[in-house]
Image (cartoon, rainbow, N blue to C red):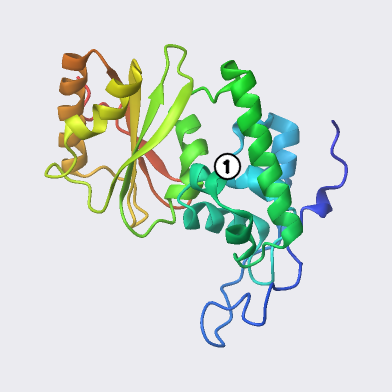
Amino acid sequence: MVLTQSVELEDSAPPAGPDAGLTGAGTPPPYQPKLRDMPQGERPRERLRDYGPRYLSNAELIAILLRTGIKGENVLAMSTRLLSRFNGLDGLGRSSFAELCAERGLSEAKACQLMAALELGRRLISLAPEDRAVINSPQDVANLLQAEMAPLEQEHLKVLLLNTKNQVLSVQEIYVGNVNSSVARPAEIFRPAVRDNAPSIIVVHNHPSGDPTPSPEDVNITRDLVAAGKLLSIDLLDHIVIGSGGRYVSLNERRLGFA
């Protein structure tokens, strides 16, 4: 399908209510460029056309569905906010029509579009499990989770369960709060993989500071998980730290905690 109307994916829709578009009482929101003012290579629709849907983040795909943002918040920022608000794509998929309509900027029509797309995705997966997302690089992990994890104000630790083809079986949230060795117990992190007989996992957590540089604690946790995985015959393929501004760090790429 050739996309010729790039200006339709806009962000000039009116606010959903009298206070929409304000970050506080009478405080204007920070300036966000409209998508039509962004370079073509950064616009979700053009990126999908040029590279295919697998190279887009969840926030970019949702932005294409919603098409327009609201005053003071472009559609990509709104999509990122929704993912954060519902704790990721899974939570968004479980939300009700009323819950979606209660969100700033989501009309009944947009809520219907979003729910219909998510339901089609569920039906497709049930019919064709081979079409699950495939992880071939740290960038694939970032595309899957960065938009929902980067804005979080607390550390969240998630585990991707993978099959032998590196297809994502599920994404499990393990911890919320400061991720350190006292709480990041290997038994809890590997529990979903043992339960679902997944042969490999990828661990992902965010740094609310926005700086994805791994801490010494991150390296120690990774080293413990690699050792535990060998005992359980479950491979830890990577540990990804998510930061802000599209930044992330793969501890495996840097050989931190991996022998």
Residue 170, x across and y down, in percent: 44, 30
The quadrant the N terminus occupies is top right
- What's the residue at 59%, 47% (across, down)? 59
Give me the residue at 67% from left, 77% from top: 17
**Image check: 186 left or right of 90?**
left
Residue 43 in view of the camera: no
Specify the quadrant that holds the C terminus. Answer: top left
Q: Quarter of the image holding residue 14?
A: bottom right
Give the labeled residue for mark 1: 58
Most extreme residue toward the bottom is 26
Q: Position of residue 38 (x, y in %)?
A: 69, 55
Residue at 47%, 52% in the rendered image: 245
Residue 120 in view (yes/no):
yes
Where 3 sits versus 108, above or below? above
At 61% across and 58% down in the image, what residue appears?
Answer: 100
* Nearer the observer, 176 or 124: 124
- Residue 189 in which image quadrant: top left
Rendered view: 42 above or below 82: above
Nearest the viewer among 242 and 18 is 18
Q: Position of residue 55 (x, y in %)?
A: 61, 32
Nearer the observer, 22 or 100: 100
- For badge 1, the amino acid type reads Asn
